Image (cartoon, grey):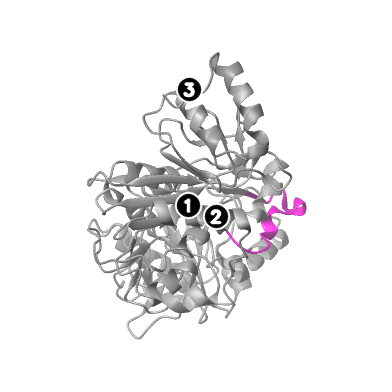
Amino acid sequence: MLSATCRAVRPSSIAACRLAVVKRAYYLSGEIHHEPFHPIPGRNPEWLNGQQAFERHLDSAQHIFIHGGAATPNHLIDNMVNVAQEKKLKDIKLMHIHTEGPAKYNEPEYEGIFRSNSFFTSSNCRKAIQDGRADFTPIFLSEIPLLFRRNYIKLDMALIMVTPPDRHGFCSLGPSVDCTRAAIQNARVIIAQVNPKSPRTRGDAYIHSSHVDCFVHMPENLQEMPARSMDEAEVAIGKQIAQNLVENGATLQMGIGSIPDAVLAELGSHKDLGVHSEMFSDGIVDLTQTGAITNARKKIKPGKIVSGFVIGSNKVFNFINDNPFVELCDIQFTNRTAIICQNPQVTAINSCIEVDLTGQVVSDSIGPRIYSGVGGQIDFIRGAALGTDGRGKPIIALQSATKKGTSKITPFIKEGAGVVTTRAHVHYIVTEHGIAQLWGKNLRQRAYHLIQIAHPDHRKSLEEAAFKRLKCMPSPD
């Protein structure tokens, strides 16, 4: 008679059942707490093709985590979708941060089979969320691992991408450690796409193969996000920040997008910069090669670039491959405010969608339409603001107007929009027209300084709107 563990896993072979029993018994021994680093004696993963893996382990009503970013395991996703449709499964919940690729599970024909829940939204989820076929959870990036570690979400399965095991049996999670480490610590079943094209990264990226239930071999090019060319406004913003706010020896955090890239492009003459960030991209590579980034003055992991995940082109993937200079860490560590604030001159550079005249920052949505997520913006805004050396700089940067000419500095945020950085958290707002320092300023002063960096075509109307809202004229004093 099969054990309860075997019945829960539903393997189609006695061998697979025995593997599950060994893994479960080892975890429940009283000493092991789902740490995927150490070898489990006598246990090895099965090598299957994608269809076999999901025929064996996929069932209705499961909660499944999907590895994200450049490490999105699209081969596994395709097989999962096909098997679920063939088996007529229902109500499978998928959880993930930003993923790349087509995300077939979000297509209308899979409604009722899958429901995606984004902790940070990418373009392949926006329409499904807007149409009500998928969900979005607003949450700080630093707190996503707690959903799994506190068993708020009990994961039946984790789909990940890894490098081939080395001679000791260790695989690497490649360019995305982020919240994936917490997922593999707590998932009942782990299915891994073994991709020899993935970079082998260090830090918290390792998982021993004995913790994996199924290996599926499939070489696949990583999902690239090459930097796009910057327009004049973005270049100007990069210069404003690099020349006025980034000091030698600063510890940098950069969000995603062309504005952080524009800042990095202007930092070539700086010295002893460090990196402690939730993510980084191609721009870091050149600064390392020219010697601007040394990490020499950092207090947390000095001498090393610290990040949670990497997105970019093959240029940055080649850079992180087996590079001791880079550690990819659990996002609960990288984004913890108490850790961030210990580094010198923490300079957090993030972008947004709009800012109102009181300093409320909208970053995750355009009106009611979910665009991205909360991410790590507040984690690092607070880390910089609370820097133990008193020299941190929390920066929000945006172009002064949209491509259609609408002001991004507005009297009121759009109806339905979400405030990510509150007006109490905000310090520096930067556009191509200048820098507004809002910390410690009252609403009247904030309105004045924001109007000064708004697009010239909108300053008069913003001043009139500020007077109507505040019942007094904006003023610097």
* Highlighted range, magenta: 99-115
Q: Is residue 217 visible?
A: yes
Indicate the quadrant where residue 184 lies.
Answer: bottom left
Circle 2 SS class? helix
**Direction from residue 339 to residue 65 in the image, left or right:** right
Q: Position of residue 194 (x, y in %)?
A: 51, 77
**Direction from residue 434 to residue 182 in the image, left or right:** left
Instruction: Please say whether residue 64 is one of the residues in the magenta stretch.
Output: no
Residue at 53% x, 62% y: name it: 69
Instruction: Please say whether residue 104 is one of the residues in the magenta stretch.
Output: yes
Q: Position of residue 294 (x, y in %)?
A: 30, 70
Amino acid at pointer 3: Arg
Q: Position of residue 187 (x, y in %)?
A: 44, 57
Label 1 Cα crowd, 10 Å radius (few <14 / some 14-19 / many 20+):
many
Label 3 Cα crowd, 10 Å radius (few <14 / some 14-19 / many 20+):
many
Residue toward you, 106 or 419 = 419
Dot label at residue 236 = 2
Indicate the quadrant where residue 327 lies.
Answer: bottom left
The residue that mark 1 highlights is 240
**Figure disc tally:** 3
The residue that mark 3 highlights is 444
Mark 2 touches mark 1? (CB < 8 Å): yes
Residue at 26% x, 69% y: name it: 303
